[in-house]
Amino acid sequence: MTHITPKQRDELSELEPMLQMVEASMGFLPTSMMTMAHWPELTQVFGGLGATILNSGELDAGLKQMIAFAVSNAAGCRYCQAHTANSAQKNNVSAEKIKAVFEFESSALFSDQEKAALRVAVHAGMVPNAVEAEHMSELSKHFSDKQVIEVVAVISLFGFLNRWNDTMATTLENSPKSFAADQLASHGWVAGKHE
């Protein structure tokens, strides 16, 4: 159960254009955003940052969501695991491949490029950060400098979201919760405090 009651949409007229954009993109309004809306300026800036990182650039949206899923797994945030797995599926990543992220190093479902990105994500999600020079060197073999920036931006965005949602015990919405329960439970996923 969330520690702070989310705002209601009818209380947030100044955020309505952004809420419409987020709802159109995700199919629902995330509880995390409605909680963040207690500080509208933060919500506005964060919404823009998230849209830039996830909805523009050169990297495939499905890869971005797998990166976000991998870093969220390393960080242990069940809320973000559910969201990113659900979003990866919405961006044409098969359920089989999403589940294989847990064993991406040994899975034939991933290219060397994808493995390099997921490896950096997993190591970046550890505390302390465990990314080594060889991880970044391997990443640079497969991605341009701009694309490396995109990979790290996705990781960093979810660094914030993992901490936010686990600290707030954000209540998980039905769509990502249902997807995660169906597809990730065999890997130990439970909603836990995000029930």
Image: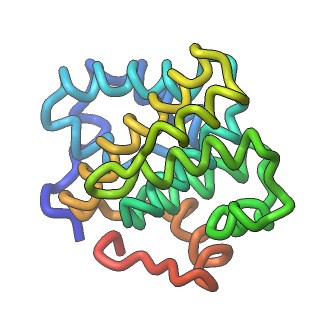
- Quarter where residue 116 is shown: top right
Q: Residue at x 59, y 81 (%)?
A: 187
Q: Is residue 75 above or below residue 131?
A: below
Q: In this view, does 81 lie to the left or right of 31?
A: right
Q: Is residue 181 above or below residue 179?
A: below
Q: In this view, does 36 lie to the left or right of 131?
A: left
Give the image location of residue 24, x and y in percent: 58, 32
Q: Which residue is drawn at 49% across and 54% down?
A: 122
Q: In this view, does 54 lie above or below 178?
A: above
Give the image location of residue 146, x and y in percent: 58, 14
Give the image location of residue 124, x and y in percent: 41, 47
Q: Which residue is drawn at 44% across and 56% down?
A: 72
Q: Residue at x 52, y 45 (%)?
A: 120
- Quarter where residue 144 is shown: top right
Nearest the camera: 118 or 51? 118
Nearest the camera: 93 or 7? 93
Give the image location of residue 149, x and y in percent: 51, 21
If the image is split into quadrants, where does the C terminus sit? Answer: bottom left
Q: Which residue lies furthest to the front in this view?
A: 134
Q: Residue furthest right?
A: 108
Nearest the camera: 136 or 66? 136
